[in-house]
Image (tube, rainbow, N blue to C red):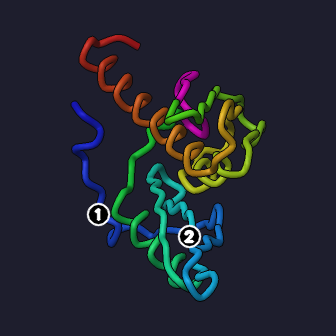
Amino acid sequence: MNVKSKKINPDELELAEKIVAINRVAKVIKGGRRFSFSALVVVGNGDGCVGFGMGKANEVPEAIRKGIAHARNNLLYIPRAGTTIPFEINGKYGSGKVFMKPASTGTGVIAGGPIRAVMELCGIKDVLTKSLGSTNPLNIIRATLEAFKRIAYLNEITKLRQKK
């Protein structure tokens, strides 16, 4: 009944990736500053599977590669109702809050940057979203995926109770 127990094999899927944020991090040492980079990446197959990853390295391409590898290992199945989500849901992670609402066909993805990346890569084409609280892309993505986990959990409960 737990959503986290379902393991998705990334090798069987054709995954697309989208870079959400790249940050330059400076570490001050005796001789000056040492720079490294962190990359936040979202991967998905456009058919209900999506994951995110964070990679850190001294070069940008290496950070992106590490982020993609981490995202491929943390895929999640997203329940959908046609081209939208089944019902309204709130997600919260840290101070990042996300509100998502189903939309009629043809509305499109009404969402900010990090949420838009998740929605497009998991195949949701019509949804209304609002991010509240934090503007940190990592917290927003985590709040979005927490909301999706709750959708999957509630769908399983309604099936067990034989309700609509």
Q: Confirm or deny contact between disc 2 and disc 1 (CB under 8 A).
A: no
Name the one closer to the observer, 83 or 136: 136
Q: Is residue 85 magenta?
A: yes
For the point 64% across and 26% down, which residue is it?
Answer: 101
Mark identifier at residue 9: 1
Q: Which residues are magenta?
A: 82-91
Task: Report the amino acid beneath label 1.
Answer: Asn
Quarter the C terminus occupies: top left
The single residue placed furthest to the front in the displayed view is 30
Q: Is the stretch drawn in magenta largely helix, strand or loop?
A: loop
Q: Secondary structure at mark 2?
A: strand
Mark identifier at residue 38: 2
Label 2 – label 1 distance at C-alpha: 25 Å
Q: Quadrant of residue 151?
A: top left
Left or right for 6, reference 38:
left
Q: Secondary structure at mark 1?
A: loop
Nearer the camera: disc 2 or disc 1 = 2
Percent coordinates x, y for residue 37 in the rendering: 58, 75
Task: Report the amino acid beneath label 2.
Answer: Ser
Residue 33, relative to residue 132: is it above or below? below
Residue 65, relative to residue 78: is it above or below? below
For the point 65% across and 72% down, which residue is it?
Answer: 24
Residue 129 seen by the camera: no
Percent coordinates x, y for residue 110 in the rendering: 76, 39
Left or right for 162, reference 131:
left
For the point 37% across and 22% down, which residue is it?
Answer: 154
Percent coordinates x, y for residue 135 in the rendering: 69, 43
Left or right for 47, reference 22:
left
Residue 106 seen by the camera: yes
